[in-house]
Amino acid sequence: GYHLDAGKLAALLARHAVTRLGVRHVRDHVVDVERTADGIVTAVQTRESGAVTGDLFLDCTGHAALLVGDVPFIDRSDVLFNDRALAVQVPVAPDSPIAAQTDATAHAAGWIWDIGLPTRRGVGCVYSSAHMSDDDAAAMLAKYLGTSEPISPRRLTFRSGHRARFWNGNCLAIGLSAGFLEPLEASAIVTIELSLDALLDDWPTRETMALVATRFNTLFRYRWDRIVEFLKLHYVLSRREGAYWRDHRDPASVPPRLVELLALWKHRPPTRADFPMVDEVFPAASYQYVLYGMGGHLPEAGPLKPGASPAFAPIAQRTRGLTSALPTIRAYLDACRMTYRPTALEQLS
């Protein structure tokens, strides 16, 4: 997908909501949350704007989880060990190539991301503090960048896990207030989108609130569990040596469902029957990509049927022809900017 300026996108969405959808946008700080004896939120007290009352509240306060903070947090660090990251921005020349993909490179106690953008690269070192010190992680990142000069990365700490309940009473946690898992598959945005889809599909009334909340919690506990398993798959399949990687392959750290599926996949590839949900975050195809790409001991594919090779040949030839004619990523983005015309909404800013 495209990498967007998150700040500009948020400002655009705010303008759209206010000018087109009639949303009242209040920028303020939450100082207190008023609840009934049974935990129903009646009002959010703000520093400057007073009380904000309502029937349904969405907690989008990030890691602070100011509205659902009393709901227990389920720590998943026994499965996903990474808990820290160092991030830097690396300037690039105006005419330098832009990578068409995000690179993820394993190291002794985690991995390094490398995202190519028009004016810079976003690079970060994700690691487990139980297996690598902060200084060693900084040295690892500097080595990857090919510099002997001291670097000044932004230091991030996180805890992989999620709430035991995402919808509590009349309050629904969305985004970081619901939970966070290490960024190997960048699953945070899709969980936000799926949460909003589920809310709209099953919009509650006072009479149905408790039932809708139960259904939502069941669905999203399933989804968070599946994301944890898919992330863990990358580490379980690795044959790298070292304490960090051996600990990841320790059966005690692998979710039981993933253990069962890996045993099954020794005899057949993943299929849709393994993932029955309509909107799976990572369907069978995602598991196939990782298993085949990392050599996950899948059974040998059977021989091609007679006549298959001649049928595939023109497809391969057409693919090579189209690929050779594609512009570079930088040329494509430059062309997009040249032909772009701002919308009436954007002209309001």
Image (tube, rainbow, N blue to C red):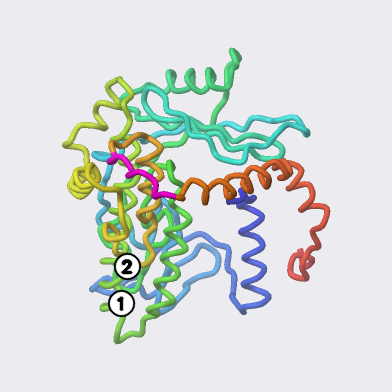
Quarter of the picture holding the C terminus: bottom right
| Left or right, residue 322 beside residue 269 | right
x and y percentages locating residue 248 in the rendered image: 26, 32
Determine which of the numbered discs, if any, sits on residue 167 in the image.
Answer: 2
* 305 within the magenta span: yes
Identify residue for label 1: 212
x and y percentages locating residue 315 in the rendered image: 58, 50
Does residue 2 lie above or below 221 as drawn?
above
Q: Which residues are magenta?
A: 298-306
- Relative to the observer, which residue lies in front, 348 or 336? 336
Does residue 157 lie above or below 151 as drawn?
below
Locate residue 14: give its quadrant.
bottom right
- Relative to the observer, which residue lies in front, 247 or 138? 247
* 4 within the magenta span: no
- Relative to the observer, which residue lies in front, 152 or 127? 127
Secondary structure, mark 1, is helix
Q: Residue at x 79, y 66 (%)?
A: 347
Contact check, label 1 and label 2, Cβ < 8 Å: yes
Secondary structure, mark 2, is strand
Locate residue 9: give its quadrant.
bottom right
- Relative to the observer, which residue lies in front, 203 or 152? 203
Q: Residue at x 67, y 68 (%)?
A: 15
Q: Residue at x 43, y 51 (%)?
A: 187
| Left or right, residue 239 beside residue 115 | left
| Amino acid at the residue labelled 2 | Trp
